[in-house]
Amino acid sequence: EDSSKDDPNVMNTTEEIVAYFNKNANRVKTEATKVVKNYEDREVGEIDAPKALMYLTKIIYFDVEQDEIDYLKEANENTYDYILVNESLNNLENIPNNYMDAKIISVFTTSRIDKQVLKQFKSLKLIALRSVGFNHVDLNYCKKNKITVVNTPNYGNKSVAEFAFGLMLDVCRKITQSYLEFKDSKVNPQKLLGYELGGKTIGILGLGAIGKEFAKMAHGFDMKILFMGTP
C-alpha cells in the first residue's frame, strides 16, 4: 500500500521536490529576465524573442489531464521552457527531436520509463513523478546515469483512506442496497438492517501512511484495531 521506501534516489516530500526545482530555476529565471528585458528594450532586429528560452530549463510533462493544464501553465510560465503532453511516455518509441534536450520530465503512473526510453533524453537530470509509487521507472539506469527521481508520497493518504472507510460503511449499513430498493419502490426493511461499527474488530494489513489514516478513523468509530506492520 505504501510504496515510497527509503531509496537514496527518491526524495520523500513535496517540499524537497519544489526546493530541487527552485534551486536552479531562480538562477535561470534571473538570466532569462535579463534577456527578456533586453528584448523589450531592443531596437528592431537586435535580438529574437526565442533566445530568451535558451536560458530556461526545459521540462516536459507527460500524462497531462485536461484539469491539470491551467495549473501547470501558471506554475511554469516564465520559469521553465515547458511542454505539456497528454500521451504517456511509454507510447513514444522514438521521442521527437525537441524533447531530447529536456533536463526534467514529469510523469504519472501510466508512463513506463525503461532504459530504452530514458537513453533518448541526452540531457536528463531529474524525473519528477506525480505519484506515490516509483516502480514504473528504471531506477538502476537512473542511478548509473546520475538522474535524480522524486515522488509525492503523501498527497493522497487521507483521500484513499476515506474512500476505503466509506466502502466499509456502505457495506455494513447497506447504503447502496437501500438506495436501489427505494428507487425501485421495492423495500424490504428486514433485509436492510445493518450493524454498528462500534465495538467491532478491524484488521489492517500494512500500517503505512494510508493504513495509519484508516486506523485513526476506525478509532473514532470506537473500533478495536488489529494491524500488521510498524505503527
Image (tube, rainbow, N blue to C red):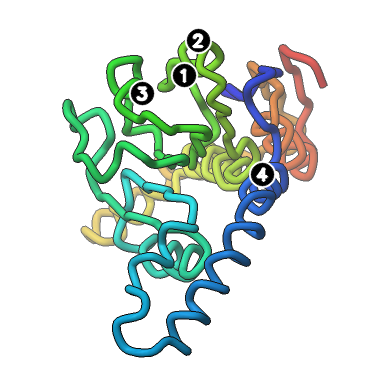
Q: Quadrant of residue 89?
A: top left
Tag in front: 1 or 4? 4
Mark nearer the N terminus (1 vs 3): 3
Q: Are marks 1 and 3 in contact (CB under 8 Å)?
A: no
What whole-number distance in Å separates the C-alpha atoms at marks 1 and 2? Answer: 11 Å
Mark nearer the N terminus (2 vs 3): 3
Residue ID for mark 3: 118
Number of the label disc, if any, that sits on residue 135: 1
Neighbours of disc 4 within 10 Å: few (<14), some (14-19), many (20+):
some
What type is the residue that disc 1 sits on? Asn
Neighbours of disc 2 within 10 Å: few (<14), some (14-19), many (20+):
few
Tag in front: 1 or 3? 3
Q: Position of residue 177 (x, y in %)?
A: 35, 46
Question: Along the line of sight, which residue is nearer the eye, 70 or 176?
Answer: 70
Residue ID for mark 4: 20
What whole-number distance in Å separates the C-alpha atoms at marks 1 and 3? Answer: 15 Å
Residue ID for mark 2: 140
Q: Residue at x 79, y 16 (%)?
A: 230
Q: Position of residue 17 (x, y in %)?
A: 64, 43
